[in-house]
Image (spheres, helix red, strand yellow):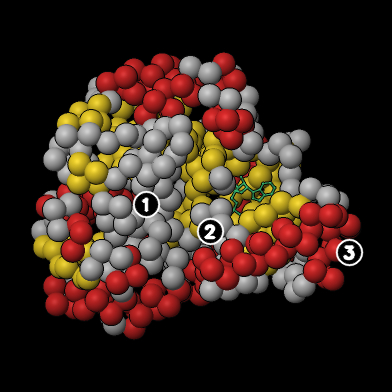
Amino acid sequence: MFRKILIANRGEIALRIQRACRDLGIATVAVHSTADAEAMHVRLSDESVCIGPPAAKDSYLNIPAILSAAAITGAEAIHPGYGFLSENAGFAEMVEAHGMAFIGPSPSHIGMMGDKIAAKAAMASLGVPLVPGSPGAVMDLAAARPIAARIGYPVLIKAAAGGGGRGMKVAREPAELEDAFRLARTEARAAFGNDAVYMEKYLDRPRHIELQVLADNYGQVVHFGERDCSLQRRHQKLLEEAGSPAITPAQRDTLGETATAALRKLGYRNAGTLEFLYQDGQFAFIEMNTRLQVEHPVTEMLCGIDLVREQIRIAEGARLGYEQRDISFTGHAIECRITAEDPTTFMPTPGRVTAFHAPGGLGVRVDSALYAGYFVPPYYDSMVAKLIVHAPTRPDAINRLRRALDEFAVLGIQTTIPLHRRIVDDKAFQAGDYTIHWLEQFVAGN
Ligand code: ADP
């Protein structure tokens, strides 16, 4: 058993991981930038170490400072959370080289899935269906033209190192290909320092369906069903559901069997999420995330499991100790990502929170590091709270979500709570009738 874990993150996810550690009787070390000295994740940890100035590159991405913090506090393991260093294979490798456990997959699997071209090739060779596209990297416009003609317009140019929806451009017809190709490359170089791109058929009305998996170090791989993350703005998720209103239990089983069989062959370990686009009854793999995801709580509510606890147990070398048939799916869960943004213009709204009241009651969970008097700094991601509800049926969950959003008060800064409140009352959302393009139109029409 680990006695002490360093959490290399901030905000709600640092708190979330701290809670799992506490529940297991494990001490926690928080790291923080100078801007986060008063943050909740620092206040609630057993120990904390300042690792640098506000800019993430100097603090939460500062590998030598984080490794030193772990060494001086005697931490035995590091949990990276999501974002920051969570998908940095070199960091995972260094953690292990310093004699600590990295709570996540092996560095080689992080590296493989971090290159989306390699990830697609690996999944295809393991029998997982893909979105039609280029067989590998597309080097230049001359190579792109015949590929686009073969897969058929519209096509999407995507960054091999992509993440957060960046480095992704659509070409609806041949005349748009040159600009899309150039822009995707430029954006990819700026965001990831790597301008390798590939191409995919641009699907016109898919849903984003992803599958949560856990694997121990002994070849046992199970899945915890799907999440529907189709409600997106600029390819970024805003609201997630488990299960998907569009997927039957039989489809869940089939997808789960294909995915877990592939990961078993790959020798994957710890938590992971396989992302698919789903259209016309077909699933097509787009990428795999080798970390805990923002939206993991909907799965926890649906399956009654603590995924972070499982990640820690796996990293300690424990066996999962259960099989697929032991995992059940009860009711319906929905999560709203609440950001410090203007709910109509989406301009970030950092500033002082003057009052904070979180909703409660049966089936309501709030993961947030906000408190009254807290100053939301301008340096980091604008997500400040996740509201998760669970109820016996989807209509019940929607009613509970409406009620919880009405109770939720964050004063002093603007948040996206009013946007979520409008989504809940929309007929198409209530009918579960939406694709990945729905929210953009909904926002534009309001
Ligand atoms: P990132 O790693 O940047 O998040 P993803 O490959 O996961 O990129 O895609 C993010 C989102 O972009 C998807 O959830 C989907 O909404 C959209 N998307 C990705 N690939 C396609 C595609 N081939 N056709 C249509 N939409 C796509």
85 relative position to 251: left or right: left
- Residue at x 78% of width, y 62% of height: 178
Kindly state the secondary structure of the residue where label 1 is placed.
Answer: loop
Q: Are marks 3 and 1 in contact (CB under 8 Å)?
A: no
Question: Gap between marks 2 and 3, in whole Å?
Answer: 26 Å
Tell whether circle 2 marks a residue whose Cβ is less than 8 angstroms from ligand 1: yes
Identify the residue at image location x=54%, y=39%.
Answer: 232
Local secondary structure at mark 2: loop
Is 97 drawn above or below residue 303 in the view shown?
below
**Residue 239 locus on image (x, y percent):** 47, 35
The residue located at (59%, 63%) in the rendering is 187
Provide the secondary structure element on which disc 3 rests: helix
Q: Residues within 10 Å of mark 1 (few under 14, many from 20)?
A: few
Q: Residue 381, labelled with which disc? A: 1
Residue 146 is marked as: 3
Residue, disc 2 = 163
Distance (Cα) linking label 3 and label 1: 39 Å
- In this view, the residue in front, 300 or 134, is 134
Residue 379, how many percent across, how many down?
31, 57
Q: Which quarter of the picture shows residue 216?
A: bottom left
Q: Earlier in the sequence, mark 3 or mark 1?
A: 3
Q: Which mark is residue 142?
A: none
- Picture quadrant where residue 445 is located: top right
In the figure, 332 relative to 216: above or below?
above
